[in-house]
Amino acid sequence: MNAAEHRVLVLGAASADVKIYPREQVVEPATSNPGIIRWGWGGVARNIAENLARLGAEVHFVTAVGDDHLGRLLLKPLHDLGIHTDASLIVAGKPTSTYAALYHHDKRPWLAFEDMELLREITPGHIHRLRGLVKSVDMVCLDANLPAPALQTLFRLTRRYDVPVCVDPTTAALAPRLHPYLPDITVITPNKEEAEALLGAPFDTAEAISAGTRRLVHLGVQLAVITLGAQGLFYATSEESGRLPAFPVDVADPIGAGDALTAAVAYGLLEDVSPAEAVRLGITAATQTILCHETVCPTLSLEMLYEKLI
């Protein structure tokens, strides 16, 4: 199967992102601090969609944006990459979603805020109208920002049409809503905090994290990956489990690394590589992403990932 044959439906958040980097180690409250302020496009599902398109997939993306200047600007680069957005909602009278993050001086995220209320417009009825598209794709990828009723309808459709599902739990607060659907999930990629929330147990040791991946498989997931940032990741299937270290690199911006990992793992499975090889592609994509100041690395490609692996 070649790249042109991979057809993926991605559903979830898309936003305008604002990133604030202090220029000084000490931030003074109640006053103006010198900093570097950058904005771009984000949202977990939007990032996954862009990564998949850069890897070579035909991508159909479903989100909700406002009928405003930001919404139109957000969709344009997706169209330029060939991503289909005709099934997305353009909502009059409401602003496009926004995410803002304040970083520590060492580029670690410190505080973040998001306004994703617009995604409530994605109703079960809208998902049901997409049933023909769901049936036609090779995989569905989603983030947990989708409203709970929409999630329920979507999983009913993927179950009916036997479509593989890849899920990024997005945040620890959202992760538990995925628990009823674990038997319907092909691959899930939580970070440690999201996995703890999903399984309702703390992971205090490496052995506990490894057991967490196997627990997700026991509950029905085919490939479970728990990411640990600079400490790498654990993964498990019904036949194997293991740990992969992160590549030692200088971080330009960690935002988006998990989304790149999710997209590359999904793409690897579409390429019929082994789960272990798909996870290796994922951690390589994450590494390339944190080397970029952009949330999605603009030079990402499948050829790049395999070259870095070699």
Image (cartoon, rainbow, N blue to C red):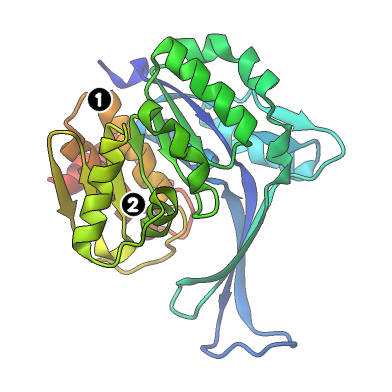
Q: Residues within 10 Å of mark 1 (few under 14, many from 20)?
A: some
Q: Position of residue 199 (x, y in %)?
A: 38, 49
Q: Nearer the viewer, residue 135 or 236?
A: 236
Q: Nearer the viewer, residue 202 or 276?
A: 202
Q: Position of residue 166 (x, y in %)?
A: 39, 32
Q: Position of residue 211 (x, y in %)?
A: 22, 51
| Residue 50 visible | no
What residue is pinned by disc 2? 286
What residue is pinned by disc 1? 271
Q: Is residue 121 left or right of residue 104?
A: right
SS at mark 1?
loop
Residue at the spot x=43%, y=48% of the render? Answer: 198
Q: Callout 2, which amino acid? A: Ala
Tell me the CA gap for discs 2 and 1. 18 Å
Q: Is residue 248 left or right of residue 3?
A: left
Q: Tell me which corner region of the image, top left, top right, bottom left or bottom right, holds residue 265.
A: top left
Quarter of the image where the N terminus is located: top left
Sequence-wise, the earlier of marks 2 and 1 is 1
Quarter of the image where the C terminus is located: top left
Q: Is residue 149 above or below residue 213?
A: above
SS at mark 2?
helix
Q: Position of residue 85 (x, y in %)?
A: 61, 25
Q: Callout 1, which amino acid? A: Glu
Q: Residues within 10 Å of mark 2 (few under 14, many from 20)?
A: many
Q: Is residue 248 left or right of residue 151?
A: left
Residue at the spot x=46%, y=18% of the render? Answer: 158
